[in-house]
Image (spheres, grey):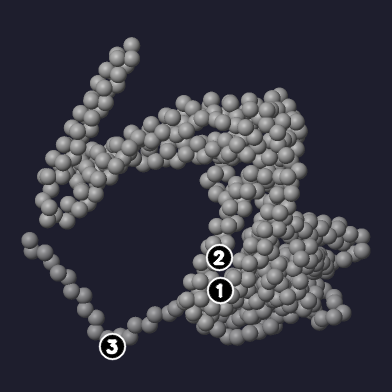
Amino acid sequence: MKKILLLISFIFLFAQNSLTTQADKNLTRLLNQIPKNSPEYALDLTLVKEIKALKPKSLDFSLSIRDEKSYIDAFNRLVFYKKLSDDLDNKIKELQNKLDILSSKTDPTSKLQYIYYQKLLGIRQNLKKQIDDNVPRYEKTLVEKLKDIKFDSSIAKKNIKKLKKELENYKVKIDNLNINLQKWQILNNSDKISQIKKKIENINKKIKDLYKKFINSYEVLWFKALQNKNKEAFSIDDNILYYAKLLDSRIYDIYNEVITEFEKKNFGSKILVYGAEKSFEYSIKKIWNVLNYPLFSVGNRTITPVNFFMFVLILIIGWFVGKYYKYLIYKIRRKYNLSHATATLLANMGYYAILTLAFLIALKTVGLDLSSLAIIAGALSVGIGFGLQNIVSNFVSGIIMMFERSIKVGDYIQIDENTRGEIVDISMRSTIIRTNDNIDLIIPNQAFIQNNVINWTLGDDVVRFRVPFGVAYGSDIDEVERVVLEALKKSNLPYIKKNFKYDVEPRVVFIEMADSSLNFELFVWVRGEYAKRPRRTRSKFLKMIYNALNEGGIGIPFPQHDLHIKDSVPFEVKIKRDNG
């Protein structure tokens, strides 16, 4: 039997040596195809050496657990295997992509690269297979051996206290070195800068070693809690993960995966209770950390999402209070006999005062003082300089209009020949005018401050109308006046007959002798809605005048021109006949 085994081994070794020899011959043949004076020859020679140097590797999955230290080493090796497995997955994909690219190339260098990557791919796939085949068994054995190991938690706690002091000392040293580094950077001393950076680098390496010791010490406490099925294990593992993340962010996920598997296998069904509690606490903690994450700084104050949320919430509450205040003002307007303009002024001023107060309270809530407000005002002034001039101008104009009250809600105004109407609202930025066509015009406030505005109802709603009309030449002027005034007195037209403030007696005034007519104007006074409807009001008076003149036999002219032809001008008419 031994002879047969020796024969099989001999045949295997012979076959392997034959394959190796054949592969070496192929490499040599490819290398010989490249001229020695070629710039790629040195690269190809190195590739051949690297290919020959590549050897299969094997991992040790044996377990020899005797005490606390050997168990922790075995556990950390499990983490290493899982991390190596993840790394191999990425490297295998990378090699496969390279081989896909090189497979279509035929030059000797590309072929050598293809052989190198192919051999390297085989080695890494073999390592990956070793891990996949052995790690589940390895992990299962570790879990089973846990109950047989004695863990000394008292020593681990002492070590943690000692490590925390060492870590604090190292951090103090780094802070001092950074201060010195800034000093030498200002002085531009490259030698000192290099020395200090090396010292900082060495201390950081020592800190990394401390993180590993922290992990090992917390692992002792964690394993002890797992043995006793104590739910404190779910809080202790946070410390392991914390230092694992500081040590290497890539290894954090591996530790988290391995820890979760151990807890599931040791706690069984209790993981649903303890794990849920931990998950809830972790979620609350994570949400709180997110809410307190600094977004930006104003002055010396850091603004977090919680601060920002409170700031916005107070502004929203202020906005609702302001709206309710306006509602109350309009509700009690009739009770206290307030005019619509006065109610609007009180409502708007109170509304903006409440918003300003809410803004100041919001600033105070998030911890911003007046200096911070000055910073915001400074930033706002820059914005004003670059494009907010009109907004600020309209804002200030609105305040002036509210206090000056030269233009108020309910007034009938005219901005130009085609823009007139009643003011229905005055806000900080704009004023709304409703025309007689029931069209709302939104006009910036500065237009009322900078331009001429006709307010037909500023002092009161009494307005004098001038109604123009004409009669034919030859008409009795006194008779025209009498006929029109008599007809006016007999009519039911809406004009004012008596007023103690104004002389409101209607008058007919002779204006001019025009080209085709004798022109007059009827002066009448009206109030209220008739003053705000000038075209309709004027139309009513014109109808009355037209009917009165017709009944009185007074001629109403129309434009006409006489054409005079002198006899002395020769005049000929030629007729062209078509002979065709």
In the picture, the quarter occupied by the C terminus is bottom left
Instruction: Rate crowding at label 2 as few (under 14), some (14 to 19) or many (20 or more) other CA atoms within 10 Å.
Output: some
Where residue 248 sits: x, y (%)?
A: 55, 49
Residue at 68%, 28% in the rendered image = 148
SS of the residue under disc 2? helix
Where residue 448 sits: x, y (%)?
A: 66, 76
**Residue furthest right as drawn:** 336
Q: In the drawing, does residue 133 fall left or right of residue 241?
A: left
Q: Disc 1 designates what residue? A: 181
Image: 357 above or below 405: above
Image: 289 above or below 461: above
Q: Earlier in the sequence, mark 2 or mark 1?
A: 1
Q: Amino acid at mark 2?
A: Ile
Q: Say whether residue 301 is visible.
A: yes
Asked if the residues shown at circle 2 and circle 1 are in contact, with their CB atoms under 8 angstroms apart, the answer is yes
- Measured in 3D between alpha carbons, the distance from the residue under mark 2 to the one under mark 1, in whole angstroms, is 10 Å
Where residue 244 sits: x, y (%)?
A: 60, 47
Q: Amino acid at mark 3?
A: Ser
SS of the residue under disc 3? loop
Q: Observer-nearest residue: 376 or 490? A: 376
Residue at 72%, 31% in the rendered image = 227
Q: Disc 2 designates what residue? A: 200
Which quadrant of the view contains residue 340? Answer: bottom right
Disc number for residue 568: 3
SS of the residue under disc 1? helix
Asked if the residues shown at circle 3 and circle 1 are in contact, with their CB atoms under 8 angstroms apart, the answer is no
Q: Nearer the viewer, mark 2 or mark 3?
A: 2
